[in-house]
Image: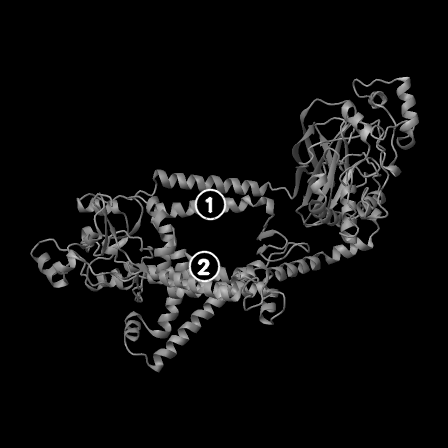
């Protein structure tokens, strides 16, 4: 006990306020034992009673086999389900208009477009942002959906097909399945040849330090032009990237390009047909198309 | 108190019950002012939702309306959109300053005359007096045994209180929907307005509790203003003051006349206790300034009546200053200084903010533009190496007519601008139509073609020109080059 604090035996009536003191004293300053207002105490007890009622009315106590269920039958899952129902009631008219409107016409109808873009943005954040980024800005290996470069086509129908069936997603029969061969790993080209092709590609894309050569041109014609085209401008049907533009999905330095030629392969995207409903896929298609790259 | 009590106090109870206060009825000048203000403020509150104001077909025709579903606030000729909520901030600042000024001039007149707690408590007290009788009668009834008559009166009183509370809650919800329609819906139990019933229930309960049961305890325990005002007042502020220089020493009328005859000084206060009897918060004003005094002036009326009876001059209790009591005590003349640094500063601030808001309101544009730069990505590189930035631009048409806005940009020369979903007209202009009293959000793509630009930000201006009137709004943003 502090030497400064007197013992509670010193409780007395304070002559000025006529109130009892608690007997606590610090450096001559005493604490008055002023009682609480009754309404305050009653309110305090009422909150305790309320909490007991709450415990009984709502699911509250965990038990070994789950938990108390409460008397009024309220459940957070049921509550969420009701909220979702209300939401779809609100969205109902928009969804109906969305279902009935051909994709090509939606963008010309301002009110529908803005509603559909809002729906699409929410669906994108929930389903697509994990790989493509919150603003569809993409990342290395994951396409940026804001630009005008498309592997599988940027028309409404192309975007819709990619969303529905995915890319190299084996569980879907209609998925985009074409794959870049592994020229190095499978022994079609040796390391020196790969290096020459990489230089050739960098020259075709007008990247600084690119070196075109007759051998490079021949190797390109023999191995790459089937998919990427004689001029290297790519092919949407096969998902073959345009090799002459400024945009590189995996990077444009020579090492990366050589590694892509040697190991082949490509990105994978899930098919969403069975996971998202028709209006959501439609909304996503419009949303992605209006990001700016739509063809 | 015995010495034993002084030595060792008995343990006190956990709580202190409220001491019932039976304020006595009083007549007089301040009571009349209070009746007048009560009638005025309650009329405004109950009737204002029914005042109509024609705004054309696209907006509701209720003079004062908080339209949450459409995010609009209507106040007579003023229509406030969510982005203009600073008007509300300005009003709150003005209200605070007016309260400060009132306080510097005449103490807590707000508390005594205009505070809703005071007004409704006054109304409840009037209802109570009407049914149960005045203070002494009520105290006697509460102390004695309950008779059937007393029970009947109590039930009638609470029923009347609840009816008033219910009207109060009912009027509140009318500010949030078309009043006549809502009254009809409430009266005929139409579906879809359960929220209105809930709010009426809440306000009925709070009004009944605060004005009927808690009364002065709201002022003493719940309201922060008594604490704040103590810091804002000064020795020149007019407060309801017992002029102790004239009232003390207190003595009976007989004693006082005897002393005066003998030429000795005597106080005017006869200690009749009427000032305490009429006080709605149970304060003894003669003890000086107090937290509980709401400055309603009813004690002045009570004291004046007594002074008239005993033939002394009125205003032993009056709106006066602490300073003057001291000065008169010392034989100096009282001074009144309404013009002091703080009142001048408050008044100047009120005028300045009021003028600013009026100016802002007078020059308010009925079109608005908001520009939001895409964050992620800030900029996009296209196939040919050009840089593109995307913006979300919202056009607001705050007028009662549908209008068309022409979007133009400047700052980034030769930029290609396109609006998703909007076809340029024959001259290549981009025109966005917006319905009456509506907004339209558009996605705008700005592309800088050609040679690579230096990294950094270039200021870009977006201008929305109203086609018919040529009025325009310009917003500034940046064009980012990675």
Q: Quadrant of residue A26?
A: top left
Query: Is residue B32 in view?
Result: no
Q: Chain of mark 1?
A: B
Location of the C terminus of chain A by quadrant is top right
* SS category of the residue bearing label 2: helix
Q: Residue at x 62, y 57 (%)?
A: B61
Colour mode of the rendering: one colour
Q: Residue at x 38, y 48 (%)?
A: B102
* Above or below: residue B414 compared with residue B154: above
Q: Nearer the viewer, residue B1 or B355?
A: B1
Residue A187 appears left or right of B413: right
Q: Secondary structure at mark 1?
A: helix
Q: Is residue B227 left or right of residue B325?
A: right
Host chain of mark 2:
B
Residue B377 image-quadrant placement: top right
Neighbour tally class for label 2: few under 14, some 14-19, many 20 plus, Cα within 10 Å: some
Asked if residue B158 is positioned above or below residue B308 in the image, the reply reads below
Mark seen at residue B41: 2
Estimate the x, y position of residue B399 in percent, counting from the top left.
67, 48
Q: Is residue B287 above or below residue A144?
A: below
In 3D space, how far apart are the residues under numbered discs 1 and 2 (Cα atoms)?
19 Å
Whole-percent x, y for residue B215 in the image: 37, 62
Q: Give the number of the disc on residue B144.
A: none
Q: Is residue B133 visible?
A: yes
Seen in the image, is A8 located left or right of residue B68?
left
Residue carrying label 1 = B94
Q: Position of residue B378 (x, y in %)?
A: 68, 33
Residue B98 placement, left or right of B272: right
Question: Could you tell which of marks 1 and 2 lies nearer the N-terminus?
Answer: 2
Q: Nearer the viewer, residue B242 or B136?
A: B136
Q: Which residue extends farthest left?
A: B262
Q: Quadrant of residue B69?
A: bottom right
């Amino acid at each position: 006990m502090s030497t400064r604090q007197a013992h509670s035996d010193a409780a007395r009536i304070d002559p000025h306020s006529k109130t009892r003191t608690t007997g606590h004293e610090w450096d001559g300053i005493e604490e008055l034992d002023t009682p609480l207002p009754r309404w305050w105490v009653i309110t305090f007890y009422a909150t305790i009673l309320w909490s007991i009622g709450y415990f009984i009315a709502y699911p509250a106590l965990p038990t070994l086999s789950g938990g108390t269920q409460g008397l009024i039958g309220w459940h957070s899952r049921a509550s969420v389900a009701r909220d979702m129902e209300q939401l779809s009631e609100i969205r109902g008219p928009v969804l109906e208009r969305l279902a009935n409107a051909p994709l090509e016409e939606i963008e010309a109808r301002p009110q529908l477009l803005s509603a559909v873009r809002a729906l699409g943005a929410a669906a994108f954040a929930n389903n697509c942002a994990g790989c493509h980024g919150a603003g569809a800005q993409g990342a290395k290996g994951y396409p940026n959906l804001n630009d005008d470069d498309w592997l599988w086509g940027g028309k409404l129908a192309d975007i819709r097909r990619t969303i529905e069936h995915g890319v190299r997603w084996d569980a879907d029969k209609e998925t985009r399945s074409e794959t870049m061969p592994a020229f190095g790993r499978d022994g079609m080209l040796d390391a020196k040849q790969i290096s020459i092709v990489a230089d050739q590609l960098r020259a075709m894309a007008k990247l600084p330090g690119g070196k075109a050569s007759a051998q490079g041109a021949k190797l390109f014609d023999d191995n790459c032009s089937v998919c990427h085209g004689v001029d290297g401008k790519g092919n949407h049907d096969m998902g073959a990237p345009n090799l002459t533009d400024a945009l590189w999905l995996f990077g444009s330095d020579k090492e990366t390009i050589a590694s892509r030629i040697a190991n082949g392969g490509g990105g994978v995207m899930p098919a969403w047909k069975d996971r998202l409903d028709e209006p959501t896929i439609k909304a996503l298609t419009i949303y992605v198309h209006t990001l700016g790259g739509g063809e | 108190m015995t010495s034993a009590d002084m030595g060792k106090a008995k343990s006190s109870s956990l709580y202190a019950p409220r001491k019932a206060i039976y304020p006595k009825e009083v007549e007089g000048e301040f009571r009349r002012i209070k009746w007048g203000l009560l009638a005025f403020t309650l009329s405004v509150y109950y009737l204002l939702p029914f005042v109509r104001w024609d705004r054309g077909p696209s907006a509701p025709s209720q003079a004062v309306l908080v339209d949450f579903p459409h995010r609009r606030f209507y106040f007579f000729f003023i229509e406030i959109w969510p982005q203009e909520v600073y008007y509300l901030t300005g009003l709150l600042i003005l209200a605070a300053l007016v309260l400060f000024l009132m306080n510097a001039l005449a103490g807590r007149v707000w508390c005594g005359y205009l505070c809703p707690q005071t007004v409704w408590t006054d109304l409840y007290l009037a209802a109570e007096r009407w049914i149960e009788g005045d203070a002494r009668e009520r105290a006697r009834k509460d102390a004695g045994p309950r008779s059937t008559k007393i029970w009947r009166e109590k039930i009638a009183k609470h029923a009347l209180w609840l009816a008033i509370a219910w009207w109060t809650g009912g009027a509140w919800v009318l500010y949030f929907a078309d009043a006549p329609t809502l009254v009809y819906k409430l009266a005929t139990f139409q579906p879809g307005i359960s929220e209105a019933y809930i709010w009426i229930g809440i306000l009925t309960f709070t009004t009944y509790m605060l004005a009927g049961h808690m009364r002065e305890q709201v002022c003493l325990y719940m309201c922060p203003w008594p604490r704040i005002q103590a810091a804002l007042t000064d020795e020149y502020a007019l407060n309801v003051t017992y002029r102790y220089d004239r009232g003390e020493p207190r003595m009976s009328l007989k004693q006082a006349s005897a002393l005066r005859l003998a030429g000795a000084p005597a106080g005017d206060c006869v200690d009749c206790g009427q000032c305490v009897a009429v006080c709605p918060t149970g304060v003894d004003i003669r003890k000086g300034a107090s937290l509980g005094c709401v400055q309603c002036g009813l004690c002045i009326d009570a004291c004046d009546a007594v002074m008239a009876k005993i033939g002394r001059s009125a205003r032993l209790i009056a709106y006066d200053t602490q300073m003057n009591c001291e000065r008169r005590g010392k034989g100096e003349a009282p001074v009144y200084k309404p013009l002091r640094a703080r009142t001048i500063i408050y008044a100047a601030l009120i005028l300045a903010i009021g003028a600013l808001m009026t100016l802002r309101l007078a020059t308010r544009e009925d079109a608005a533009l908001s520009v939001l730069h895409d964050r992620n990505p800030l900029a996009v590189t296209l196939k040919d190496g050009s840089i593109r930035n995307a913006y979300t631009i919202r056009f607001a048409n705050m007028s009662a007519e549908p209008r068309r806005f022409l979007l133009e940009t400047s700052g980034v020369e030769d930029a290609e601008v396109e609006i998703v979903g909007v076809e340029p007209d024959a001259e290549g202009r981009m025109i966005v139509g917006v319905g009456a009293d509506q907004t339209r959000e558009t996605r705008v793509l700005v592309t800088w073609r050609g040679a690579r630009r230096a990294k950094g930000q270039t200021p870009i201006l977006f201008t929305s020109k109203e086609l018919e009137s040529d009025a325009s709004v310009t917003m500034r943003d940046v064009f980012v080059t990675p």
